[in-house]
Image (cartoon, rainbow, N blue to C red):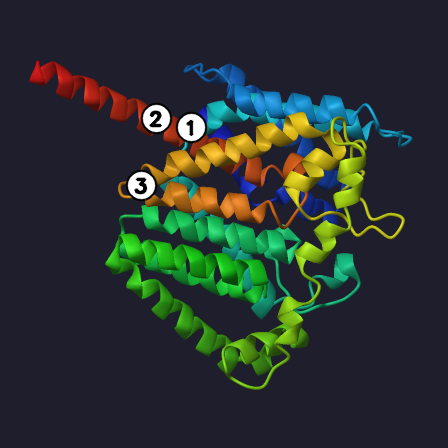
């Protein structure tokens, strides 16, 4: 009972982004306390768990290579030992987090993310000016617990992916409604593009999923109908209306200020130091006219060089290829992998927000289990035939 309570507490803290949310909206003390609590609970679960499992060494290697190599050119005056703290926190997650994930099921993560996505809808409908507290403006893109609308959109995509694992039709449809509505309210271009891609793939492999685009269309009509009562970002909303033919909106805006433009600023810097990188946080911080790279792959090679870059690319290629092998029996793992791969191209918080790393480890573990079951079935079949 105690272990279950600890496990759920860990999942709530990480998958609801609670330490950062509390830090931004409640107090720095409570935010720091919840961050330390996350690490302590992970350590406690690791040592109290009766079933000992080896850590996922490839993720441990990724963490070690990124932090140790990025330390070489880390030149900031770190009076608060930020580098050491982040290094320790990340290693605790990848070493101790596996023990939590081995005991976690698809539907548990689904319901936790469902509540997280609901916070985005609450933000949009009841607390539209919530962002004023930390951003100084209410910019009409909503994020709930997740602070950043792009991160919130990724959470909705992850939940939408997992909805395909839910056998209860009622909850599956409720999940798809909530995740789609919440994702649309982030007004994230990435969310819309990946949602369409996942939906097309899911219909191709299972015609019953044709209900998903119907849900999406109805929710868009709902948003358009009540847009006057929502404080939506005018520019992005008009662009969305223009694309869908609702009115002559500024569709040019969709192609402007794209991530490609941001990434291109950093290419020469990457080639300047491809082996050891420019140092921890150099590609994350806004400085000297640089906006922050907003790409976890480029951030990895830009700050720590080629070794951790090859590891992170290798991990996600493995997840994509391996999950595709089980797309007919467990399609949601491929959808999760695809979402993680694309979401990491829109943000650079991979090594400290822990949502991506935790769910990546979760998919890795589930694919490993599926492979073991598949191998056992082949061996049994061969024995029977002989």
Residue 365 image label: 1
First reached walking from the N terminus: tag 3 or tag 1 = 3
**Is residue 204 or residue 362 the one in the foreground?**
204
Q: What is the x, y in percent for residue 128?
A: 65, 68
Q: Considering only order in the chain, which callout, 2 or 3, is on the residue closer to the N terminus?
A: 3
Q: Residues within 10 Å of mark 1 (few under 14, many from 20)?
A: some
Q: Residue at x 56, y 40 (%)?
A: 356
Q: Is mark 3 on a helix, strand or loop?
A: loop
Query: On the image, numbered disc 2 is attached to which residue?
Result: 369
Above or below for 51 versus 154: above
Q: What element carries label 1?
A: helix
Please identify the quarter of the rendering in which residue 304 is found.
top right
State how many labels appear: 3
Quadrant containing the C terminus in the rendered view: top left
Separation (CA) of disc 3 from disc 2 = 12 Å
How far from the left and from the top, in percent, is residue 385? 8, 18
Query: CB of mark 3 within 8 Å of CB of mark 1?
Result: no
- In this view, the residue in front, 374 or 52, is 374
Q: Nearer the viewer, residue 347 or 20?
A: 347
Residue hosting label 3: 330
**Residue found 77% across the figure and 66% down from its top:** 137
Tell whether 106 sits left or right of 377: right
Residue 151 in the image: above or below residue 363: below
Labels 1 and 2 touching (C-beta < 8 A): yes
As measured in the structure, the alpha-carbon distance from the residue carrying label 1 to the one carrying label 2 is 6 Å
């Amino acid at each position: 009972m105690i272990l279950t309570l600890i496990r759920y507490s860990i999942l709530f803290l990480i998958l609801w982004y609670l330490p950062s949310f509390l830090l931004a909206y409640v107090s720095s003390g409570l935010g720091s306390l919840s961050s330390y609590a996350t690490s302590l609970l992970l350590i406690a679960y690791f040592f109290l768990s009766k079933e000992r499992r080896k850590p996922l060494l490839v993720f441990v290697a990724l963490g070690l290579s990124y932090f140790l190599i990025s330390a070489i050119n880390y030149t900031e005056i770190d009076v608060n030992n930020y580098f050491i703290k982040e290094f320790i926190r990340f290693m605790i997650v990848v070493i101790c987090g596996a023990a939590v994930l081995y005991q976690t099921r698809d539907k548990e993560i689904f319901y936790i993310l469902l509540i997280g996505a609901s916070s985005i809808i609450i933000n949009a409908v009841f607390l539209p000016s919530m962002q004023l507290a930390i951003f100084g403006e209410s910019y009409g893109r909503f994020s709930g617990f997740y602070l950043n609308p792009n991160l919130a959109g990724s959470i909705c995509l992850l939940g939408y992916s997992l909805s395909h694992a839910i056998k209860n039709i009622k909850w599956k449809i409720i999940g798809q409604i909530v995740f789609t509505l919440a994702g649309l309210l982030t007004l994230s271009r990435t969310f819309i593009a990946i949602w369409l891609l996942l939906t097309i793939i899911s219909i191709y492999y299972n015609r019953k999923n044709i209900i998903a685009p119907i849900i999406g269309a109805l929710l868009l009509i709902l948003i358009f109908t009540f847009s006057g009562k929502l404080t939506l970002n005018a520019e992005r909303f008009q662009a969305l209306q223009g694309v869908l033919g609702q009115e002559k909106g500024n569709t040019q805006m969709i192609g402007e200020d794209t991530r490609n433009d941001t990434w291109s600023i950093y290419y020469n810097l990457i080639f300047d130091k491809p082996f050891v990188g420019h140092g921890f946080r150099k590609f994350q911080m806004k400085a000297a006219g640089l906006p922050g790279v907003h790409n976890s792959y480029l951030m990895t090679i830009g700050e720590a060089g080629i070794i951790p870059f090859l590891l992170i690319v290798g991990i996600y290629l493995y997840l994509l290829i391996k999950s595709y092998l089980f797309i007919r029996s467990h399609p949601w793992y491929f959808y999760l992998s695809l979402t993680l791969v694309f979401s990491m191209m829109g943000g650079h918080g991979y090594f400290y927000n822990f949502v991506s790393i935790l769910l990546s480890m979760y998919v890795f573990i589930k694919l490993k289990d599926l492979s073991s079951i598949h191998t056992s079935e082949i061996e049994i079949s061969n024995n029977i035939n002989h």
